[in-house]
């Protein structure tokens, strides 16, 4: 009886699988189609229960060929020490390498910098200096504290570039969910006065400019009706929209977009119930209108945190590699395929 039940569930799952309609993009003779998704999160959970969905190892061992430098303080606030970790290949070139600064998610109230360890190891092995940062969560300090912290981290990385073998002109910010939101804010507006406070004096001569931003399912506009009603943005900002709408606009990457913001790579799943996919749909339109180079991957049938799936993670890394190769190489110009049409 149990076997028949499993078979029935398997048939139901197969019937409801929804394949992405993304068009494969050529890259050095290769292409990578988006992995098939699901009708709903429930169907995805059934697939996982049946062993049909493999997840990434979130706590991998750091391999011998990767150097791990942990718990480096980049900022001190009152008695709180804000720290970052650095990962780089032990066989790295003597030439300064591009740096990737990863910003963790968690609705601005949870999460930790080690959440990105799988990415950190992978990108250290690919020749990047991979960095992950902590920031003040909303239960410790409200907006704009987290943005100011990440902005200080970018400045600190530039100040210590020679020490850690980093090219300070070749830096990208990468984040998922709340981390994607913070990456966009710092990448688009990190040098604005509201986000420039709180850094040590020795960092003030460095700016927050980066060459690229990668946003995985992060919100770009906190002023939507849906966002205004959610607990997470309200907890992050500390004041309801009606009491301070300008604060909510300042906290929204949408309102900081202009022609000179960094090229942006976007990933979002269509069944995301945490950050609706129309956040990224609109973000792509705003970037296109401002003529900002960008690339948008809309994965049909995938939910929030979709890159925990091995197949989705492979897909994301394939296009991250392609995007970073274009935008983090010296003397590289950002022309098509990422420049939007007239």
Image: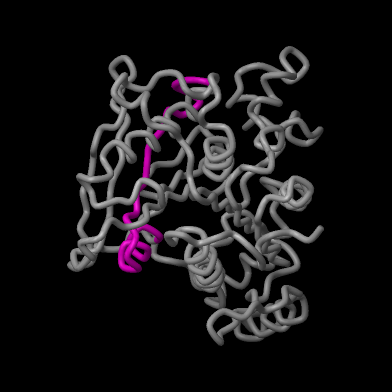
Q: Quadrant of residue 244?
A: top right
Q: Is residue 278 magenta?
A: no
* Residue at 23% in and 65% down: 93
Q: Position of residue 256 (x, y in %)?
A: 66, 33
Q: In front: 331, or 228?
A: 331
Q: In front: 77, or 138?
A: 77
Q: Quadrant of the N terminus?
A: bottom right
* Residue at 32% in and 65% down: 127
Q: Position of residue 310 (x, y in %)?
A: 49, 71
Using residue 312 as the reference point, say whether residue 10 is left or right of it.
right
Q: In front: 41, or 275?
A: 275
Q: Position of residue 304 (x, y in %)?
A: 62, 54
Report the coloring of the rendering: one colour
Q: Quadrant of residue 6?
A: bottom right
Using residue 58 as the reference point, say whether residue 7 is left or right of it.
right
Residue at the far front: name it: 331
Q: In front: 56, or 268?
A: 268
* Residue at 71% in and 81% down: 14
**Image: 134 above or below 263:** above
Q: Position of residue 189 (x, y in %)?
A: 57, 32
Q: Quadrant of the C terminus?
A: bottom right
* Residue at 52% in and 36% down: 186
Magenta range is 119-142
**Image: 248 above or below 230:** above
Count every numbered label the image shows and give the total: 0
Q: Quadrant of residue 258?
A: top right
């Amino acid at each position: 009886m149990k076997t028949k039940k499993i078979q029935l569930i398997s048939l139901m799952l197969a019937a409801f699988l929804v394949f992405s309609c993304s068009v494969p993009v050529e890259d050095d003779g290769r292409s990578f189609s988006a992995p098939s998704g699901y009708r709903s999160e429930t169907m995805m959970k059934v697939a996982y229960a049946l062993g049909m969905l493999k997840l990434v190892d979130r706590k991998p061992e750091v391999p011998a060929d990767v150097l791990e430098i942990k718990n480096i303080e980049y900022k001190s606030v009152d008695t709180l020490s804000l720290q970052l970790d650095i990962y780089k290949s032990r066989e790295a070139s003597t030439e300064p390498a591009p740096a990737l600064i990863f910003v963790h998610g968690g609705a601005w109230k949870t999460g930790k910098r080690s959440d990105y360890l799988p990415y950190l190891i992978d990108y250290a092995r690919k020749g990047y200096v991979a960095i992950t940062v902590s920031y003040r969560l909303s239960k410790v300090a409200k907006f704009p504290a987290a943005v100011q912290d990440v902005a200080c981290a970018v400045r600190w990385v530039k100040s210590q570039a020679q020490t850690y073998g980093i090219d300070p002109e070749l830096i990208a910010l990468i984040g998922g969910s709340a981390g994607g939101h913070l990456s966009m804010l710092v990448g688009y507006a990190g040098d604005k006065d509201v986000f420039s406070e709180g850094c040590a004096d020795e960092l003030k001569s460095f700016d927050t400019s980066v060459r690229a931003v990668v946003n995985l399912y992060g919100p770009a506009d906190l002023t939507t009706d849906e966002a205004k009603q959610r607990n997470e943005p309200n907890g992050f900002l500390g004041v309801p929209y009606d009491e301070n709408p300008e604060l909510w606009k300042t906290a929204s990457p949408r309102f900081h977009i202009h022609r000179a913001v960094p090229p942006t790579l976007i990933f979002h799943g269509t069944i995301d119930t945490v950050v609706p996919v129309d956040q990224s749909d609109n973000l792509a339109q705003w970037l296109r209108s401002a003529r900002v180079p960008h690339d948008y991957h809309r994965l049909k049938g995938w939910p929030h945190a979709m890159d925990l799936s091995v197949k989705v993670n492979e897909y994301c890394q394939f296009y991250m590699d392609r995007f970073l190769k274009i935008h983090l190489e010296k003397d590289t110009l950002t022309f098509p395929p990422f420049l939007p049409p007239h």
